[in-house]
Image: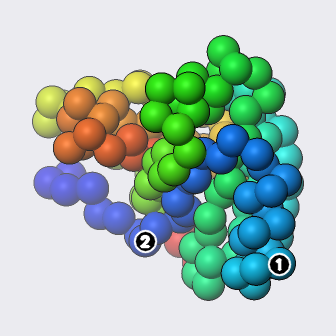
Amino acid sequence: MSRLDPRGIEHVGIAVADLEEAKRIFTELLGFRVLDEETVADQKARVVKLDAGGSELELLGSTDPDGPIGKYLTKRGPGIHHLTIRVRHLAVTLRALEERGVELIDRTPRVGAGGKLIAFLHPKSTAGILIELCEHEPA
C-alpha cells in the first residue's frame, strides 16, 4: 500500500462544553437532523450524530472531566476535535502506515461509536490534526 486510499470523510468530531445546547443550535437553528445519540463509556463521552449530507457531524460531550473530551475541552476549549476518514481494511492500513513511520495511537482497530471499527493516528504524524480512521465496507 503506497497511500491511505481514503473512501471519503466519515465525520468531523466537534468537542462541545454543553452538549444539549450544541444539539439545539445544530438542529433548531441550523437545521441538521439527529441520526443517533449514544454514550461511549470507554471514552467517557456522549455523542450526538448529525446528518451532514453524505457524512456526519459528531457533537462530543464529556461525561467525565478526566476523560479524553473533558481534557481536550480544558486544554483547548470547544471546537473541531478530529477528522474521520473512511478506509477499507483498517488493520492492513494501520500496519502500512506504521511501516511508513506514522505514529499510531491505536495499533489495532477497536470498536467506536456506532459499533464501527476505528483507530486514531497521532497528531505528531499528521500536521497536528487528530485523525481517526474508520473501516468502511464497500457497498
Residues packed near mark 2 inside 10 Å, few (<14), some (14 to 19) or many (20 plus): few
Going from N to C along the chain, the mark reached first, 1 or 2, is 2
Residue topped by disc 1: 28
According to the image, label 2 marks what residue? 8
Q: Is residue 129 above or below residue 107?
A: below
Q: Amino acid at mark 2?
A: Gly
Q: Position of residue 48 (x, y in %)?
A: 77, 56
Residue 8 coordinates in the image, percent (x, y): 43, 71
- Position above or below: 36 against 33: above
Q: Is residue 107 left or right of residue 15?
A: left
Estimate the x, y position of residue 112 in percent, counting from the top left. 67, 40
In-image side of 94 versus 82 (left or right): left
Residue drawn 39% across the image and 46% down it? 131
Q: Is residue 48 above or below residue 39?
A: below
Q: Is 84 left or right of 53, judged from the image as shown?
A: left
Residue 115, can we see it?
no
Q: Residue drawn 68% across and 54% down?
A: 59
